[in-house]
Image: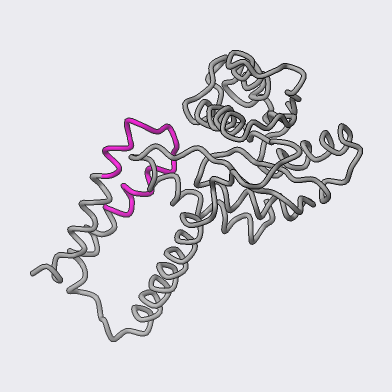
Amino acid sequence: MLKRNIDLIVGSLFIFYFIIINFMSLLMFKYLFLILGLLCFIYHFIKKYLNKKCTLYKIVKGVICCVLIIFILVESIMVLYPKHDLDTKCDYIIVLGALVNKNKISQSLKERLDSCVEYLYLTHDNPKIIVSGGQGRGENISEASAMKSYLLSKGIDEKNIIMEDKSRTTKENFCFSKKIIEGDSHKKIENLNIKVITTDFHTLRSKIISKRVGYANTTFYTSSSNGALFILNYTREFFALICNIIFNC
């Protein structure tokens, strides 16, 4: 009975999860879980009509199994990748930007900035901080400007904060910050230790991108994903990571 209805159970879980996160996230990606749930239900009612000896059926089944294996392996690496390095001293901190709602920082960005403050408190370091993020749709100010204001409100010395307010993507975050850091330090980026502050699910992709644009020594101190959005964030990041690896975007 369980084996015969496993597709209904999985489909119900997908749809139930979509209902939960629908009220918590504005990301269109959340509809993937609704679609997957509906596909599971459709499959349940048509599977007895499928010719399971058909070559096409076997190919599709094989492809799905391969994708699932790759997904599980990549997700495991993302979850286990080191995210809270306190031992490695850094010359600069880069805080990667996130959404600003008009003039107000989003919860995810607040958590990144709080992680930055926490890192400074725990290590007693005094490096310069690059707040990196341009102005996007629905944002009245740049992410960098909002981030700087928040850090100032937390008692961070203004002379230690440098704004990078042109970037729109993670790759641009690192490219534009690299120019600022090299200009400020008069050293090559590969000779500096950089601490990156972002959200946990974003760590592996950030490492790959930073490596591609010349960073040799990056470590991370991340904020944690919201519990209910953990699956959404890590699933979305899987596709973003694959896209980055294939298209270098």
Residue 9, located in which quarter of the rendered image? bottom left
Residue closest to the far front: 124
Residue located at (69% from left, 43% from top): 89
The answer, for residue 141, to whether it is visible in the render is no
The answer, for residue 146, to whether it is visible in the render is yes
Residue 153, percent from left and from top:
59, 13
Which residue is more in the foreground, 235 or 83? 83
Residue located at (86% from left, 39% from top): 182
Magenta stretch encompasses residue 52: no
Q: Give the colour scheme of this rendering.
A: one colour
Count of marks placed on residues: 0
Residue 215 located left or right of residue 237: right
Eyeballing the image, is 108 above or below 213? Answer: above
Which residue is more in the foreground, 47 or 174? 174
Residue 112, percent from left and from top:
55, 32
Residue 82, percent from left and from top:
54, 53
The prevailing secondary structure element of the residues shown in magenta is helix
Residue located at (54% from left, 28% from top): 109
Range covered by the magenta-colored residues: 17-37
Residue 20 located left or right of residue 173: left
Residue 93, percent from left and from top:
69, 36
Eyeballing the image, is 38 above or below 90? Answer: below
Residue 59, located in which quarter of the rendered image? bottom left
Which of the image's four quarters has the N terminus?
A: bottom left
Magenta stretch encompasses residue 30: yes
Residue 204 located left or right of residue 89: left
Eyeballing the image, is 246 above or below 104? Answer: below
Residue located at (54% from left, 48% from top): 83
Residue 165 located left or right of residue 238: right
Residue closest to the far right: 186
